[in-house]
Structures are given as C-alpha cells and as structure tokens.
Image: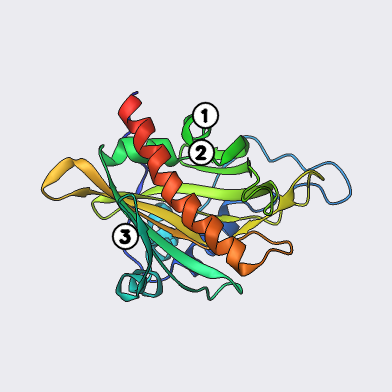
C-alpha cells in the first residue's frame, strides 16, 4: 500500500474542543442535510475558507489541549494487549473522555492512511459496518457517515454517526480529528450517536522511526437508554480491539 505524505501543517495550540468546533463551522457552512426537503447542494467547486493565513491559524486551537494531555497523569483505567486507556469525566456531556495509547509497527503516514475516512478503514475496522463520504471539501477534509455494529449481544444496538473529519500535520506527527454534525437526515434502523471533539495523534518513536506511538482521545455519546456499566464494558473492548485490528491490517499492508 502506498502511504501518503500527510496533510497541511498546523502549529501547537491550547484547546481541542473550541478549535475543532470553529474549524468545522468554517468548513461546513451551509451543509447539514435536509430539514423537511431536499438537502441543499453545495456550490461548485466546494471551497473551504479559513480566516487568517491558511488553515494553520484557524486550526491551531484544534490540537491537543492541556485538559486532554492531563489524562496521562490520571489513574490508568484499563491496560491489556499493549493498549493503555485512561478516562476522566467529559466537559462536553455526562459521559467520559477516554485516552487510549499504544505502539504500532509502521510509519506515521501509513498508520494515519489506515485511520482516515475511506475504503481502507472499512476493510479493517471490525466495529464499522459502512462508511460513506457525504461531502468532500479538500484532500484531507470531509463529512462522513458511518455505522457501527451492535455490541454486548445487542444491548448496544447499531449506531450511526455523521462526522466532520480533518487530517493535519502537528509537530513531528499527524493528527486526524473530528466532531459530529447535527445532520437531520436519519435512518430508522440506527440510533444516531454523537462524537464530541475527538482525535487520533500519531508520532514516530524516537529510537525506532518505523514504529509509531498512536494516541486516541475519544468522547462518544452513544445516546439511548444504556447503563453506564454497559458503556464502560463496550469502550474497553472497542479501544483494545481497535488497536488489534489496526496492527493486523498494517502487517498485511
């Protein structure tokens, strides 16, 4: 598999949440699905306008903020199969913000190529059952709709998400992050979940450039009447299996 060279660069900032929201707002103005009628078509060609000089100024606040990095000093929530997970109460909703971290045996570009929206992601991610690109703004920026399988003997039924996704260079690595949109077009066979600002940050290991440290920040509201104990069990297995699926896919690439 041919690996890409990543996205545009952005400079370090302070707030993951406010940055991604502002970034999404600029890129998806006028996009959001039908509200009683046909979904308005974007102008052609679709252009994404970022205030300031290029995307860097607008996106610099979309990077790993101190409130997220601070998870590293919190108590480990679970650790198995070379994956460590921390958690703390989310500031966005009543659930938790999870931080997952593990080493994968490949370069940063190849790892992020497997994570970004597209057919490759659907091929290896065992939780994902479908993935469609609804709007494509530029090479590393899109609106995606994807569905996930039921979990825990269908205590958690299949979910659907519509996310704004962007991949960008950060420091010596790459950051692929996103947030859900209030997309009004829904399908009755799925419960619509919501991803609050989240992202996957990948950097090369200093002593082993062909290995990468992959860190994920996830705060997903599954919605529906689900006991917190079921959510905790699902998140622990989902994050562990995610790394396992990715490692297997990279070995085959």
Query: How far is the residue under mark 2 from the one under mark 3?
Result: 23 Å
What residue sits right under mark 1 in the picture? 119
Residue under label 3: 11
Q: Nearer the viewer, mark 1 or mark 3?
A: 1
Q: Which mark is residue 227?
A: none
> Closer to the N terminus: mark 2 or mark 3?
3
The reply to whether the C-beta atoms of the residues labelled 2 and 3 are less than 8 Å apart is no
Element on which disc 2 rests = loop
In what element is the residue under mark 1?
A: helix
Q: Nearer the viewer, residue 59 or 1?
A: 1
Tag 3, which secondary structure?
Answer: loop
Residue in the picture at 41% in, 66% down:
61
> What is the quadrant of the N terminus in the image?
top left
Residue behind mark 2: 117
Marks 2 and 1: in contact by CB < 8 Å?
Answer: no
Q: What residue do we see at 59% from left, 67% from top?
A: 229
User: Which one is earlier in the sequence, the residue at label 1 or at label 3?
Assistant: 3
Category of crowding for the residue at label 3, using alpha-carbon neighbours closer than 10 angstroms: few (below 14), some (14–19), many (at least 20): some
Separation (CA) of disc 1 from disc 3:
30 Å
Q: Residue furthest right?
A: 36
């Amino acid at each position: 598999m041919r690996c890409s060279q990543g996205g545009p660069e952005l400079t370090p900032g302070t707030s993951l949440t406010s940055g991604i929201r502002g970034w999404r707002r600029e890129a998806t103005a006028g996009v959001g699905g039908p509200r009683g009628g046909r979904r308005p078509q974007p102008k052609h060609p679709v252009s994404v306008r970022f205030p300031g000089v290029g995307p860097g100024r607008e996106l610099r606040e979309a990077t790993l903020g101190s409130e997220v990095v601070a998870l590293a000093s919190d108590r480990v929530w679970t650790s198995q199969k070379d994956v460590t997970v921390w958690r703390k109460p989310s500031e966005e909703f009543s659930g938790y913000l999870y931080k997952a971290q593990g080493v994968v045996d490949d370069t940063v570009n190849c790892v992020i190529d497997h994570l970004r929206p597209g057919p490759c992601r659907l091929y290896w991610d065992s939780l994902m059952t479908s993935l469609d690109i609804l709007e494509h703004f530029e090479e590393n920026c899109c609106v995606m709709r994807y569905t996930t399988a039921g979990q825990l003997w269908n205590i958690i039924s299949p979910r659907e998400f519509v996310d704004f996704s962007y991949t960008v260079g950060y420091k010596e690595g790459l950051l692929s992050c996103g947030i859900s949109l209030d997309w009004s077009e829904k399908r009755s066979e799925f419960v619509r979940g919501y991803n609050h600002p989240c992202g996957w940050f990948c950097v090369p290991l200093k002593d082993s450039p062909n290995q990468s440290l992959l860190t994920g920040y996830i705060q997903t509201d599954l919605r529906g009447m689900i006991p917190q104990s079921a959510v905790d069990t699902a998140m622990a297995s989902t994050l562990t299996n995610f790394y396992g699926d990715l490692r297997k896919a990279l070995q085959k690439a």
